[in-house]
Image (cartoon, grey):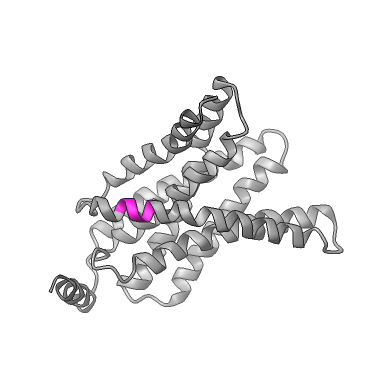
Amino acid sequence: MNYFLLIIFGFLPSVIWLLFYLRKDSNPEPKTMVLKIFFYGMLVAIPTACLEIVILKGFSYLPISFFLITILNIFIGVALVEEIMKYLVVRQKVLKSPEFDEPVDAMIYMLIAGLGFAAVENILILFPLSQFFEIFTISAVRFLGATFLHALCSATIGYFLALHFFFKKPRKFLIFGLLISILLHGLYNFSIIVVDGVLKFAIPIAILIGLAIFISWGFQKLKHKDPPIVIASERSERSNLNKE
């Protein structure tokens, strides 16, 4: 199979969701900033995979049941590590930028980082495959499943980050957003890997629909909620300083 084609099918789910959600920003972010954060989201996927391997290997030595090890692997070794790493991209590369000047930006940039991360994850999963139909099918399934989940979980963190950063809500709001995303990400994976029967599909579908509704509501909420004047003033001053 042509590697170029594999890369295309790896990127396509992320690009489609990215274009869809960028339309929800009434004040579009600079294309260079969008590409930058998408790239950093991709870049962080590599050390994340290495860290996950180390953590999963460590959990395998614990003197506990296989079921409990599976729980730790899914919720801590994967969900916690991935959501934290995606958040760190935005924390390190966006929060101090003059482009980060309105509440909805927190959701947009978290979503961009999450989709960049998902693109690399898709490519790594598709690379061992050789049949076109198999590649197309897996890519389509991940478009509706794992890639969408990464976008939604990241945007969820972004909503609570906006409350904390722009509206001076206590840090516990941000921590709550991280915990909710980690829990739902882990529950999604747990359902697919461990659960049998109709719940194997019902739980992931319910999670995706619930998060999609919340994210749609979150975008509308932040669009029509101006941050305190002092915050807006601080962002404006920082932007002017950077332009001088």
x and y percent of residue 20 in the render? 32, 40
Q: Which residues are magenta?
A: 34-38
x and y percent of residue 56 in the render? 72, 57
Residue 236 in view (yes/no): yes
Residue 155 in view (yes/no): no
x and y percent of residue 169 in the render? 37, 75
Left or right, residue 169 beside residue 64: left
Q: Is residue 37 magenta?
A: yes
* In-front residue for pair 192/147: 147
For image coordinates 55% across by 24% down, the residue present is 1
Q: Is residue 149 magenta?
A: no
For image coordinates 80% across by 58% down, the residue present is 60
x and y percent of residue 35 in the render? 32, 50
Q: Give the total number of marks visible in the rendering.
A: 0
- Quarter holding the C terminus is bottom left
Where 166 sits versus 192, above or below?
below
Left or right, residue 84 beside residue 151: right
Left or right, residue 124 beside residue 22: right
For image coordinates 69% across by 42% down, the residue present is 193
Where 14 sits versus 94, above or below?
above
Dividing the picture into quadrants, the one containing residue 225 is bottom left
Where 174 sits versus 153, above or below?
below
Dominant secondary-structure state across the stretch colored magenta: helix
